Each structure stands twice: as structure tokens, then as C-alpha cells.
Image: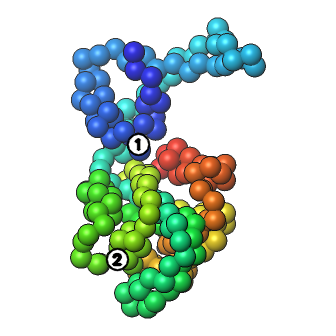
Amino acid sequence: MLQKPLDSAYHTDYDFSIRILKVRYDLMILPVAIEWKSDLSISQNVKILEIPWDYLQHEVKDRGSYLLVLKLEKEKFIEVGRLGKLMFQKGYYIYVGSAMSNLRARIERHRQKRKKMHWHIDYLTHVADGFLSIPIRSSQRQECEIAQSLSSILKSGPPGFGSSDCLCLTHLFYSEKNPLQTETFHNVLQRFRMRHP
Ligand SMILES: [Zn+2]
């Protein structure tokens, strides 16, 4: 039995979603919404849901935006291309970017520590102690909007970082604590992941 939210699984499990789209005429797929009661037992109320196939057919593609969460265990001076030598406090850095094709390959490139320095973020991924990628698949380029939302809940990083081609102050944000453990961060993530254009 499949137990995945079909409507949003494509952000995190792209292969699963592609497979489901391919076999949808051969399988009977019955998504249901279940409800937990306050004692954590499952309520008898079960709602049959509809799968928005047309929407998924259009949106489940290897493109969209991504967040990188990088950890620095110690304060460091890092030379960031033309931005020069900058001081980075220890903590978590959240970067937002986009790739409107080959999103997975782009994220994989960011994960590699040894590479030709091309983007500002390369100087940071090169020395970071921890790396986590969070894809937000979409047919729309949402990176600047995501950056705007992050700027309201996180401290802004160095001006101009990753934002040479847009009007944003920066595409890098800072948090002393792991942002994945905060509700505000998850709220922003969910808002963009669940948004239907
Ligand atoms: Zn921007």
C-alpha cells in the first residue's frame, strides 16, 4: 500500500512521482484523507480525495527552485569571488537558487566540494561542514519570492550574495540554530511547495 501524499511527494521523491504518473492507467489509485482523534486513534471519517493529474503532469518535471542548508562549525573568513573576503559566523546558512531544467544535476553539482568556482555559493559549499538540499519543484521560477519570504524570518547574509542578476539584497540567509527545527522555516517551505500556480 502506498502511503505518500501524492500531491506534494514530487518535491522530495521525484522518481516515485514519475513512476506513479507512468502507471496511473494500469493501477487503481485511491488516495484517502484520514484523521487522527485526540487519543491518536484513527477516526472512522475517511475522505476520498481526487488526484490533480493534469496539474501533476505539468509540474512533475526536473525543474524549479532549491534551498541549500549549509553548516559551518567554526567562524571562518572566506574569499567569495568578487565580493572579496567575508567573515562567516558559525551556524547555518540557507541559500536559495533555481534551475529551470536539470534541477537534480544542479543540486548534485552543489553537493560536490571539489569543482571549478563559478557561483558565490561554490565558495561556501567548498568549506561547509554540513550540506542538505531541499528541492521545491515548480514550472515557475520562484527563487526571488522565496528569498523575500526567508528575509522575513532569517537574518540576511552578505549583500549581493547570489543576487547579481536580480533585485534581491541577497540570496543567502543565516540562522544560529538549525532552521529545520523551526516552525517558521517549515511554514515558508510548505507555502511554496503546496502552492498551485
Ligand atoms: Zn533574487
Q: Which numbered tag is attached to residue 12?
A: 1
Task: Give the percent coordinates (x, y) of residue 154.
Answer: 64, 66
Image spot of residue 121 (x, y percent): 40, 73
- Residue at image position (39%, 91%) is 82
Task: Look at label 2 and name its amino acid.
Answer: Trp
Could you say which quadrant of the image residue 39 lies in?
top right
Left or right relative to 55: residue 179: right
Side of 61 relative to 50 (left or right): left
- Amino acid at dot 1: Thr
Look at the image and tell me whether residue 142 can be seen: no
| Residue at image point 59% right, 18% down | 34
State which quarter of the image contains the N terminus.
top left
| Residue toward you, 75 or 55 | 75
* Real-space CA distance between mark 2 and mark 1, rounded to the nearest whole angstrom: 24 Å
Q: Is residue 127 left or right of residue 89?
A: left
Within 8 Å: ligand 1 and the Cβ of disc 2? no
Task: Check disc 2: other Cα within 10 Å, few if <14, some if 14-19, many if 20+.
Answer: few
Residue drawn where x is 24% and y is 76% of the image: 116
Q: Quadrant of residue 176?
A: bottom right
Residue under label 2, please give it: 119
Graded by Cα atoms within 10 Å as few (under 14), some (14 to 19) or many (20 or more), the crowding at tag 1 reads: some
- Tell me the element at label 1: helix
Of 32 and 185, nearer the camera is: 185
Where residue 81 appears, as percent x and y from the top left, is 37, 87
Looking at the picture, does residue 30 appear above or below residue 55? above
